[in-house]
């Protein structure tokens, strides 16, 4: 099983959040694609097309995308990645630990809430991944 881990990357704490998701995946021998680890971060002078192509290639062989929905709104890149995965028939799950879903409806959009299993904690993510791995055997 392979998971694409999506979420904001600009701040160190955002990358650390994604890396925590990565560690939970590793616990279940789920291979991962982390955009900042596997393609790097944008810096002045870096070709956007190269980064985009690397991120898109990260979906190759993916069975799952795990998206971080924390923050005021879903990040533009995260929303794109979730939509791309959905269009490709890749299962989409998300984690939002900073606010209750019913308090963040305006930030998430009906389509995200209506098409995505949204978990509230790393513990819930751990249990969900355990179930997914067990069901794929």
Image (cartoon, helix red, strand yellow):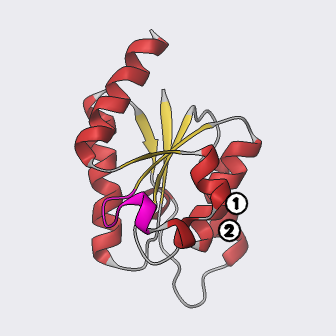
Tell whether 1 sits left or right of 128: right
- Viewer-proximal residue among 98 and 75: 98
Answer whether residue 67 is visible to the viewer in this image: yes
Q: Which residues are magenta?
A: 96-103
Q: Is residue 34 magenta?
A: no
Where residue 119 appears, as percent x and y from the top left, is 38, 46
Q: Residue furthest front?
A: 102
> Which residue is at 66% across, 49% downward?
57
Answer whether residue 29 is visible to the viewer in this image: no
> Which residue is at 74% across, 40% downward?
88
Question: How far apart in space, not on screen, are marks 2 and 1 (Cα)?
Answer: 5 Å
Where residue 13 appears, as percent x and y from the top left, is 28, 73
Q: Residue furthest bottom?
A: 44
Q: In the rendered image of this protein, does residue 81 appear above or below residue 58?
A: below
Residue 50 tag number = 2
- The secondary structure that dominates the magenta segment is loop
> Which residue is at 36% across, 61% downward?
100
Say which residue label 1 marks.
53
Q: Determine crowd level at label 2: few under 14, some 14-19, many 20+ residues with C-alpha closer than 10 A.
A: few
């Amino acid at each position: 099983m392979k998971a694409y881990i999506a979420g904001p990357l600009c701040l160190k704490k955002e990358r650390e959040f994604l890396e925590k998701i990565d560690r939970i995946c590793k616990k279940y021998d789920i291979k991962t694609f982390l955009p900042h680890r596997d393609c790097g971060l944008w810096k002045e002078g870096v070709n956007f097309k190269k980064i985009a192509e690397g991120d898109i290639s990260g979906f190759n062989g993916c069975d799952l995308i795990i998206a971080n929905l924390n923050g005021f709104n879903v990040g533009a890149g995260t929303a794109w990645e979730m939509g791309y995965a959905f269009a490709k028939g890749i299962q989409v799950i998300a984690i939002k630990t900073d606010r209750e879903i019913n308090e963040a409806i305006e930030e998430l959009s009906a389509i995200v809430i209506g098409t995505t299993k949204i978990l509230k904690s790393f513990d819930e993510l751990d249990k969900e991944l355990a179930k997914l791995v067990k069901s794929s055997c």
